[in-house]
Image: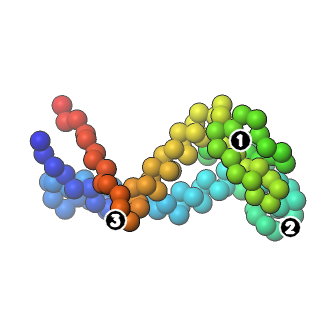
C-alpha cells in the first residue's frame, strides 16, 4: 500500500503528494449565505442582503436555506433567529448533501487535539 500526503497547492512537489487547491471554508459559507431566503423586513432594516433569493434562474441555486415566520413541519435542519425560522427542507436532497459536506469539512478543519484523524482510502486499480 502506498501513502500519499494531501497538500494545499496547484502542483505536487513530489510523487507522494496530492495537491488540492480548494476554496476556504469562509468562501463556502459566503456562497451558502447567498442561497438563503432572507425575509423582506430583514433586508429593509439592513440586517442582511437578499443574495440570489430574488432570481430563481441563478444557476448556483443548488443549495437552499428557506425561511418562514413559523416553525417548518418538514425540515432536515432548522434554527430560529429573530423570530424567523431558517431551514433546509427534508425533501431537498441536494441541500441536505451539501450541508452534510460542509459539516464534514468543518470536522476535517478542526485542529483540537481531542479528535481522531480521518483515514482516506483511494482505490488505485
Q: Is residue 123 above or below residue 98?
A: above
The first of marks 3 and 2 along the sequence is 2
Contact between marks 3 and 2 (CB within 8 A): the answer is no
Q: Which image quarter is the C terminus in?
A: top left
Instruction: Give x and y (percent) for residue 114.
Output: 35, 62
Q: Which image quarter is the N terminus in?
A: top left
Q: Which residue is mark 1?
A: 57
Instruction: Give x and y (percent) for residue 63.
Output: 62, 44
Q: Residues within 10 Å of mark 3 (few under 14, many from 20)?
A: few
Instruction: Give x and y (percent) for residue 33.
Output: 65, 56
Residue found at x 25% / y 41%: 121
The first of marks 1 and 3 along the sequence is 1
The CA distance from mark 3 to mark 2 is: 42 Å
Please indicate, yes or no, whether residue 85 appears anywhere in the rendered image. yes
Please indicate, yes or no, whether residue 58 appears anywhere in the rendered image. no
Which of discs 1 and 2 lies nearer the camera? The answer is: 2
Instruction: Give x and y (percent) for residue 52.
Output: 71, 52
The CA distance from mark 1 to mark 2 is: 26 Å
Please tell me the numbered disc located at residue 113.
3
Q: Which residue is mark 2?
A: 45
Q: Nearer the viewer, residue 73 or 65?
A: 73
Residue found at x 14% / y 54%: 15
Which of discs 3 and 2 lies nearer the camera? The answer is: 3
Could you tell me which secondary element the residue under label 1 belongs to?
loop
Q: Is residue 47 above or below residue 117?
A: below
Amino acid at each position: 500500500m502506498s501513502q500519499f500526503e494531501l497538500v494545499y497547492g496547484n502542483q505536487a512537489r513530489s510523487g507522494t503528494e496530492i495537491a488540492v487547491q480548494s476554496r476556504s471554508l469562509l468562501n463556502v459559507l459566503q456562497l451558502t449565505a447567498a442561497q438563503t431566503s432572507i425575509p423582506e423586513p430583514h433586508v429593509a432594516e439592513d440586517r442582511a442582503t437578499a443574495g440570489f433569493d430574488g432570481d430563481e434562474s441563478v444557476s448556483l441555486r443548488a443549495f437552499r436555506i428557506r425561511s418562514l415566520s413559523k416553525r417548518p413541519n418538514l425540515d432536515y435542519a432548522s434554527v430560529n433567529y429573530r423570530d424567523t425560522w431558517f431551514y433546509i427542507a427534508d425533501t431537498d436532497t441536494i441541500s441536505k448533501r451539501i450541508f452534510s459536506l460542509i459539516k464534514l469539512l468543518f470536522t476535517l478543519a478542526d485542529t483540537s487535539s481531542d479528535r481522531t484523524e480521518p483515514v482516506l482510502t483511494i482505490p488505485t486499480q
